[in-house]
Image: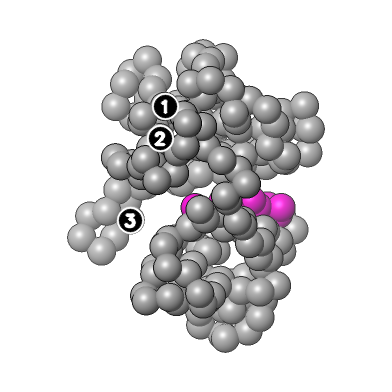
């Protein structure tokens, strides 16, 4: 069984105000809003939506759709991976312009109309390599730290970073900063689940 959760909020000054009463669904690439997996708001007015009914049959890439701006449901531009990545992540048109920042893929990434995977390099990290922003402990401590901080050297461009959670604690990539050749990734630690633990993988992909 897998869980997935996402928080919706808007900033008013320095305060986060939850956005409640939305319809939020996980939609397979190429599918429509009505076919998606529905997420329920965990508590009234919390702005936190989740589902705990995912099995291995649900593994793969999903787009996150909601009715925040379109009453009939629309793509939020966010994607997530449940369990293991499956072939649907690479089907034609599964990633649309909505999900890509302008000019994030340029001609230097493409040769003869195809991305050369032999030119890609990657690095993997785990929660056991992240340092707590408040405690300085490795790994970070749920309830005491807001972020698990990963610091790496030797990067000249910002990589594509994929976070895969393997626990029921709410995790998210808060920010990625490149200062010279020093790369810093802050993994946000949110609401703990029924069995509080910190288990995740980070995959850093660069060309």
Tell me the quadrant of the picture where the N terminus can be found: top right
Residue 62 x %, y %:
57, 31
Q: Does the magenta-highlighted stretch encompass residue 163?
A: yes
Magenta-highlighted residues: 160-169
Image height of 83 relative to 143, above or below: above
Q: Look at the image and tell me whether residue 52 can be seen.
A: no
Answer few, some or many: residues within 10 Å of disc 3's Cα (few below 14, many 20 plus, some between 14 and 19): few
* Element type where label 1 sits in the image: loop
Residue 46 x %, y %:
45, 46
Q: Nearer the viewer, residue 115 or 57?
A: 115
- Image point 20% across, 60% down: which residue? 13
Answer few, some or many: residues within 10 Å of disc 1's Cα (few below 14, many 20 plus, some between 14 and 19): few
- Residue at the disc numbered 3: 16
Q: Nearer the viewer, residue 77 or 66?
A: 77
Residue 182 x %, y %:
45, 76
Verify CB contact (< 8 Å) between mark 3 and mark 2. Answer: no
Q: Does the magenta-highlighted stretch encompass residue 17?
A: no
């Amino acid at each position: 069984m897998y869980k997935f959760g996402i928080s919706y909020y808007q900033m008013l000054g320095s305060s986060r105000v939850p956005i409640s009463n939305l319809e939020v669904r996980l939609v397979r690439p190429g599918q429509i809003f009505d076919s998606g997996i529905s997420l329920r708001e965990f508590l009234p007015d919390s702005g936190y939506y989740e589902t705990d009914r995912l099995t291995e049959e649900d593994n793969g890439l999903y787009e996150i759709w909601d009715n925040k701006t379109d009453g009939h449901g629309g793509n939020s531009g966010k994607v997530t991976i449940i369990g293991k990545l499956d072939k649907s992540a690479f089907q034609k048109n599964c990633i649309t312009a909505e999900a890509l920042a302008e000019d994030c893929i340029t001609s230097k990434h493409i040769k003869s109309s195809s991305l050369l995977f032999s030119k890609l390099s990657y690095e993997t990290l785990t929660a056991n390599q992240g340092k707590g922003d408040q405690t300085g402990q490795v790994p970070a401590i749920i309830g005491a730290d807001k972020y698990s901080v990963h610091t790496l050297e030797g990067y000249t461009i910002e990589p594509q970073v994929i976070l895969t959670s393997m626990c029921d604690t709410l995790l998210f990539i808060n920010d990625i900063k490149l200062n010279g050749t020093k790369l810093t990734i802050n993994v946000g630690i949110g609401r703990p689940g029924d069995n509080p633990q910190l288990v995740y993988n980070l995959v850093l992909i660069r060309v």
